[in-house]
Image (cartoon, rainbow, N blue to C red):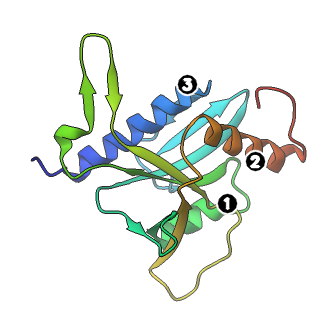
Amino acid sequence: MAKPASWQQEQISLAYLSAVATRAGATSATWNVDKDGVDVTLKRNHILVEFQMKCTFSPTILGDGETYAFDLDIQTYDALRERERSAAGYLGLVVVTKDVGEWLAHDSETLLMHCSGYYAQIQNLPEVVGQETKRIHLPKAQRIDQAGMEDVFTYAHKRLFGSAGGDGV
């Protein structure tokens, strides 16, 4: 069993988001420095959303059994919640096993990723004072999947234009 290095966790979280975004009809761009709290910007039909991606093999699960919790540093939290951002800010959390060898399975015709991702909208959350981290709740129902991508892009469109917009937002 090979325990993952932090760079491996970062890379699988980015690959996961890129794969799901591609399936949802979005393009993705990664940033070589995430000074604005952003690892990835997704674009679909001229609408942008931004994600700070995290990955864990030992997630904190709340008492309801249906919600992950992640302690996000305040600097990143503040960058993602900023009201005057041009793109809506999200935290993405990818959950993997502790064994890197189990993350992917592939043969001559398929590649399977054995992980799952969840998102939390950070945009417009309240300011936090006197803390180094902010606990973010990521319900298991808020999956980074086809339906989740629809939700984040619909929110981003409504935030900019005040309506759900047409098909393919």
Q: Which residue is mark 2?
A: 155
Q: Which residue is mark 1?
A: 123
Q: Nearer the viewer, mark 3 or mark 2?
A: 3
Horizontal and vertical percent position of residue 15: 39, 34
Mark sitting earlier along the chain (1/2): 1
Name, please, the residue furthest toward the bottom.
130
Separation of disc 3 and disc 2 at Cα? 19 Å
The type of residue carrying mark 1 is: Gln
Cβ atoms under marks 3 and 1 closer than 8 Å: no
Cβ atoms under marks 1 and 2 closer than 8 Å: yes
Name, please, the residue furthest toward the top.
108
Badge 1 density bin: few <14, some 14–19, many ≥20, Cα 10 Å: many
Separation of disc 1 and disc 2 at Cα? 10 Å
Separation of disc 3 and disc 1 at Cα? 24 Å
Badge 3 density bin: few <14, some 14–19, many ≥20, Cα 10 Å: few
Mark sitting earlier along the chain (3/2): 3
Vertical position of residue 78 compared to residue 18: above or below: below
Mark sitting earlier along the chain (3/1): 3
The type of residue carrying mark 2 is: Tyr
Q: Which residue is mark 3?
A: 23
- In this image, 87 relative to 21: left or right? right
Q: Identify the residue shown where x is 69% and y is 54%.
A: 85
The type of residue carrying mark 3 is: Arg
Q: Element at badge 1?
A: loop
Vertical position of residue 71 compared to residue 93: above or below: below
